[in-house]
Image (spheres, grey):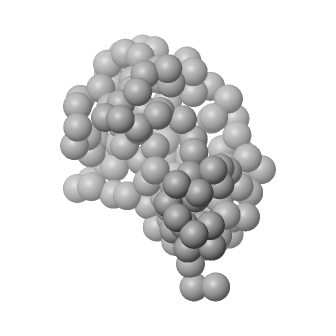
Amino acid sequence: SGWQIAQLHFAHMLASADSSQLAEFFATLDRINVLAYQAPGFVRRLQGDGEAHKFRPFRADVLLNMSVLADIESLHTYAYRSAHIEFMAKRKQWFNFSRNLFGLAVNTRRYASNAASSAGSVEAAKDERF
């Protein structure tokens, strides 16, 4: 179809990046990133200068992550059918998902740009949750 899907996450850390509470999260990132690169349908991910997890354009306690995959099936397979699911199962140990950051709900909603086209509007596309 020519379309790709981007997944964007904002995550509010429960502790500072150098804390023991977040040590496992940061120690596991390289393994998770390699898994993403090897995932069928992987296109690219957000990378700053050097380590992407240090890219914090909003606040020091908010991580920003973006990945682009070929299609929704590739995203679903990577996120929920690979070793990534073990990482996701622990996310509440590291992040506060009850906060609303910058007007965006901190959760795992994903919107495909072609959903707006097929649904007829951006408002209708918001109901197309992954």
Relative to 129, residue 3 above or below: below
Instruction: Residue lying at the far right in this picture: please name it.
Output: 81
Residue at the image point whose x is 22% and y is 43% from the top:
57
Residue 16 is left or right of residue 26, and the answer is left
Q: Position of residue 10 (x, y in %)?
A: 41, 38
Residue 5 in view: no
Q: Position of residue 78 (x, y in %)?
A: 68, 55
Front position in the image: 126 or 64? 126
- Quarter of the figure that contains the N terminus: bottom right
Q: Quadrant of residue 66?
A: bottom left
Residue at the image point whose x is 23% and y is 37% from the top:
58
Front position in the image: 89 or 20? 89
Front position in the image: 20 or 90? 90
Front position in the image: 122 or 39? 122
Residue at the image point whose x is 58% and y is 58% from the top:
125
Q: Position of residue 101 (x, y in %)?
A: 35, 30
Relative to 3, residue 107 above or below: above
